[in-house]
Amino acid sequence: MSARSRRRAVAEINVVPYIDVMLVLLVIFIATAPVIMQGVQVDLPQAESKTMDQNLSDPAIVYVDRQGRYSVQVGSGSTPVNDLQELTDFIRSFRANHPDSPVVVSGDRAASYDSVVQVMVALKNAGEKSVGLVTEPLDTRPKGKK
């Protein structure tokens, strides 16, 4: 028999390049996942709303009215805010002076969902880790309305 007939074809697949490509894709997905994942963490009540702890210092309450205008109330004074950047700056300066005070959002029932979400994103950009929502107690709502 000749040398040619003794040689057999090797039926192996070299998977090293595939592993390299997979590892590169894994690194890309790990690096881009935090950028893709956008969210605002909100402390929502499960069923009934609870009153705020009276031992906490005065909260900063961000109001969103029906027309989508913003204002911030700290203590007894209320300050109108022109845009979301001004709101972000206000909350950052508030947080520097009052690190333990809660920040809550009080949106008008007729306010657009987008306006409230934009406020919450601005608060997140200001460094807020937790944002509460102001609600009415269930028993004070007029009958027949949800």
Image: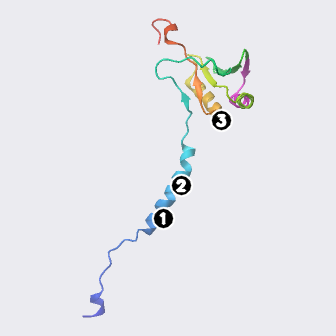
93 or 50, which lies in front?
Answer: 50
Q: Position of residue 18 (x, y in %)?
A: 44, 65
Residue visible at 51% across and 52% down in the picture? 29
71 or 139, which lies in front?
Answer: 139
Q: How packed is label 3: few (under 14 Cα within 10 Å), some, or many (20 or more)? A: some
Q: Does label 1 or label 2 sit earlier along the sequence? A: 1
Q: Which residue position is annotated with label 1?
A: 20
Tell me how far mark 1 sits from mark 3, CA to CA.
37 Å
Q: Is residue 2 magenta?
A: no
Q: How packed is label 1: few (under 14 Cα within 10 Å), some, or many (20 or more)? A: few
Q: Are marks 1 and 2 in contact (CB under 8 Å)?
A: no
- 16 relative to 69 in the view: left or right: left
Q: Amino acid at mark 1?
A: Asp
Q: What residue range appears in magenta? A: 78-90
Tell me how far mark 1 sits from mark 2, CA to CA.
13 Å
Element at label 3:
helix
Number of the label disc, if any, that sits on residue 125: 3
Q: Amino acid at mark 3?
A: Asn
